[in-house]
Amino acid sequence: MTSPATVDLSSMLRARDLSRQIPFSGAVDSSKRVHRFPAGMMLTALGRQNISATTLSYGRLLRAPEVAEERERLDLGSVPLGEPALLLECNQLGKIVSPYPYFTVLHEFGHALDHAVALQRNLSEPFASRVYGEPFHAVWIAALESNLVLLRAREMDVSMKRLKRSQSDREKLERDVKQDHSQQEMFACAYAQYISTRRHGHPAIVTELSGLRAKDWKNRRYWEDRDFKPVAAAVELALETYGLLR
Ligand SMILES: [Zn+2]
């Protein structure tokens, strides 16, 4: 179990304590403008063992005090109520377990930002991407029109018709794909991929992204370059509208 690292996200991607494991400090393409989180927004990153049994992924954003499960409340430990915390699955040595550490963290940063914007703007939902008319919601609309989402939906139809799956298998598959295509999941993926393109050619990111793209349709959540263009444009426009691009 690693000790928590508190990260001031207003200086995006300069998380000192995590940088030993994640290439946060890689050079950003100097032609790109700087993206910042809302000033003073803090996120505590906590390393925990064996969290994937109860969650789908290797990382998870906990939003105190809205966390649902008793176990999550315990995981939050000393994190002040009202502050979000990022839970990362680590091994006994405190290393992040995810084979895609960079994308795992960026994806969760996406959720944290989506949540912070909702708080800042006093929205009725905990994530801005869920609110019609918000620029982050427009990212979801752009993502729904991408080939990635259209193909996955089609694959699911075909698979439901052709394969002799048990009822519970079918329900799980449908639930997983539906969850992946929800507003906040699509936004978090789009955000992670958008940020990854700001570190053009970074070897760790290139390797992670090609691994994520090579997944079978059931688990594929990241776009090919051309397919991603309109989605990236929506992310950029949203960040600009919220005043988070300098
Ligand atoms: Zn997520």
Image (cartoon, rainbow, N blue to C red):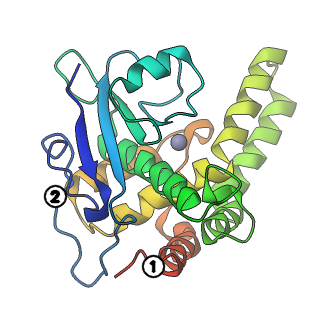
Left or right of 209 in this view: 231: right
- Circle 2 is placed at which residue position? 25
Q: Residue 189 at x, y = what percent?
A: 51, 53
Element type where label 1 sits in the image: loop
Q: Residue at x 50, y 40 (%)?
A: 215
Image coords of residue 158 (percent x, y): 81, 39
Ligand 1 within 8 Å of disc 2? The answer is no
Instruction: Name above or below for residue 240 compared with residue 12.
Output: below
Residue 118 point in image, percent of width and height = 58, 58
Residue appearing at x 31%, y 37% in the figure: 45
Q: Disc 1 vs disc 2: which is toward the camera? A: 1
Picture coordinates of residue 14, whole percent (x, y)? 20, 57
Q: Circle 2 sits in a helix, a strand or a loop, which is it?
A: loop
Q: Which mark is residue 60?
A: none
**209 in relation to 167, above or below:** below
The extreme right residue here reads 161
Q: Give the residue type that dot 2 points to.
A: Ser
Disc 1 residue type (three-letter): Gly
Quarter of the image that includes the N terminus: top left
Residue 123 is left or right of residue 53, and the answer is right
Image quadrant in which the C terminus is located: bottom left
Q: Place residue 38 in its image quadrant.
A: bottom left
Reading the image, the residue beneath label 1 is 243
Neighbour tally class for label 1: few under 14, some 14-19, many 20 plus, Cα within 10 Å: few
- Image quarter for residue 121? bottom right
What distance separates the C-alpha of mark 1 from that of mark 2?
A: 23 Å
Which is nearer the eye, 121 or 140?
Answer: 121
